[in-house]
Image: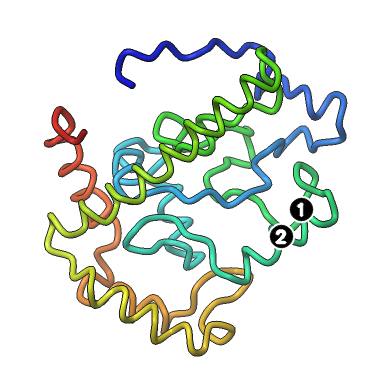
Amino acid sequence: LLGLRFPEERRATCMNCPKACYDGFRADYRCCTYHPRVSNFLLGLGSETEAGDRAIDRLIRRGMLLPEGMYSTPGQWIDFLDDQQQDSFGSSQKVLCPMLDQATGYCDIHAFRNAVCSTFFCFSDHGKAGENFWVQVQTLGSQIELVLAQWSLQKVGFDLDSYFKAFDKLAERIHEVSTPEGWTEEALSALWGSWAGREKTLMRECAAVVVEHRDNLW
């Protein structure tokens, strides 16, 4: 994989969005009508920039930041599925990525975006073969990000077992503790545990662990 040469993609130019020109996408949001899963270490790296730091503050205010990273609530996921059913991806008024700077149209963590965003091309120079290739890379990358997020939490001393048990308990009242806007204070308190109030610190510590071990993570 390290020796793999990735195909060049020139047709999917985000700041001159072909979908906005020809398929009815909003020119200001384009394919950012989506809540990506962004792992904690990526957010920690992004927080070292001024824009990324502001973006994480937005996640905290909205109740969308969990120890593993940026995760949408079940209520927000329902909105996304509804957009898919109504074929309104790219034109949605309900689901907008919190990482998007609405004033400029730029992603505030672009250099540290996740596997889905970094491998999504609305048009591929290589047709169906290119689309299939990127789907496979996207799946692999997403799994790696999930594993690294949980591994880095363990390395910095976060109680992952209690975190999963808290999720299981919250699942019994999932419609009460998750909303279309974000997770409730009750849910966030249970999931963050002793790290509540130090959310950004945890993101940065996870990033530091990944950076420290970057040469042997494979």
Q: Quadrant of the N terminus?
A: top left
Residue drawn where x is 61% and y is 20% of the image: 130
Coordinates of residue 213 in the picture (x, y in percent):
13, 36
Q: Quadrant of the C terminus?
A: top left
Say what secondary structure mark 1 lies in.
Answer: helix
Q: Which residue is mark 2?
A: 81
Depth check: give the residue in front, 151 or 60: 151
- Residue 174's mark? none
User: Amino acid type of disc 2?
Assistant: Leu
Q: Quadrant of residue 78 in the image?
A: bottom right
Q: Quadrant of residue 103 in the image?
A: top right
Estimate how packed mark 1 is, as few (under 14), some (14 to 19) or many (20 or more) residues with alpha carbons within 10 Å.
Answer: few
User: Amino acid type of disc 1?
Assistant: Gln
- The answer to whether mark 2 and mark 1 are in CB contact below 8 A is yes
Depth check: give the residue in front, 71 or 128: 128
Please tell me whether residue 183 is drawn above or below residue 81 in the rendered image.
below
Coordinates of residue 82 in the picture (x, y in percent):
77, 61
Say what secondary structure mark 2 lies in.
Answer: helix
Residue drawn where x is 29% and y is 74% of the image: 163
Coordinates of residue 110 in the picture (x, y in percent):
47, 32
Depth check: give the residue in front, 102 or 12: 12
* Gap between marks 2 and 1 measured at Cα: 5 Å
Q: Quadrant of residue 19 in the image?
A: top right
Coordinates of residue 51 in the picture (x, y in percent):
43, 38
Q: Which residue is mark 1?
A: 84
